[in-house]
Amino acid sequence: MPQKNDFSKFCCFVRGVIESGVVIQHSGKVLRNEAKMHFNRLMHHAQEFESYLHKGLGPEMAEAEDDINSAIVGMVWQLYDLSPEERDKFVEHINTFEP
């Protein structure tokens, strides 16, 4: 069953694919054969989708959308950089959090 803001969440994950892909492209990591083909295809389609989305949103809304999604992606990256103990504490906190 669709939830509120599902499309916005999807757009955030697309932004995450693009930002993560750019980091991988500039990391010196060499992808080979089928992995490279799928990676390049995914990057291309994510960038095409974001371009299409931005054309529909207009410049101001597209910039706001990029700012919000980039901040969320940045937070996720920070979670991956936590030590295992910090990550466990964070996950426990999230699992017990009630808005």
Image (cartoon, rainbow, N blue to C red):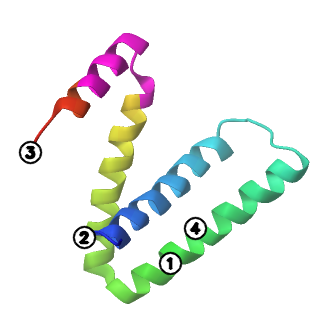
Q: Are marks 2 and 3 in contact (CB under 8 Å)?
A: no
* Separation (CA) of disc 4 from disc 3: 32 Å
In this rendering, would 47 be left or right of 99?
right
Question: Which amino acid, mark 2?
Answer: Lys
> Distance between the Cα atoms at labels 3 and 1?
34 Å
Q: CA distance from mark 2 to mark 4?
A: 22 Å
Give the labeled residue for mark 4: 46
Horizontal relation, residue 37 to residue 82: left or right: right
Q: Nearer the viewer, mark 4 or mark 3?
A: 3
Give the mark toward the camera: 4 or 1: 4
**Residue 99: which disc?**
3
Rendered position, 6 above or below 89: below
Quarter of the picture containing the N terminus is bottom left
Instruction: Tell us which disc is closer to us: 2 or 4.
Output: 2
* Mark 2 or mark 4: whose residue is earlier in sequence: 2
Please tell me whether residue 18 belongs to the stretch shown in magenta. Answer: no
Mark 4–mark 1 Cα distance, whole angstroms, equals 9 Å
As drawn, which residue projects farthest toward the front? Answer: 1
Span shown in magenta: 80-92
Q: How many marks?
A: 4
Provide residue 53's location: percent of width, then percent of height: 43, 80
90 over 72 or under it: above or below: above
Residue with the mark numbered 1: 51
* Label 4 Cα neighbours within 10 Å, binned few <14 / some 14-19 / many ≥20: many
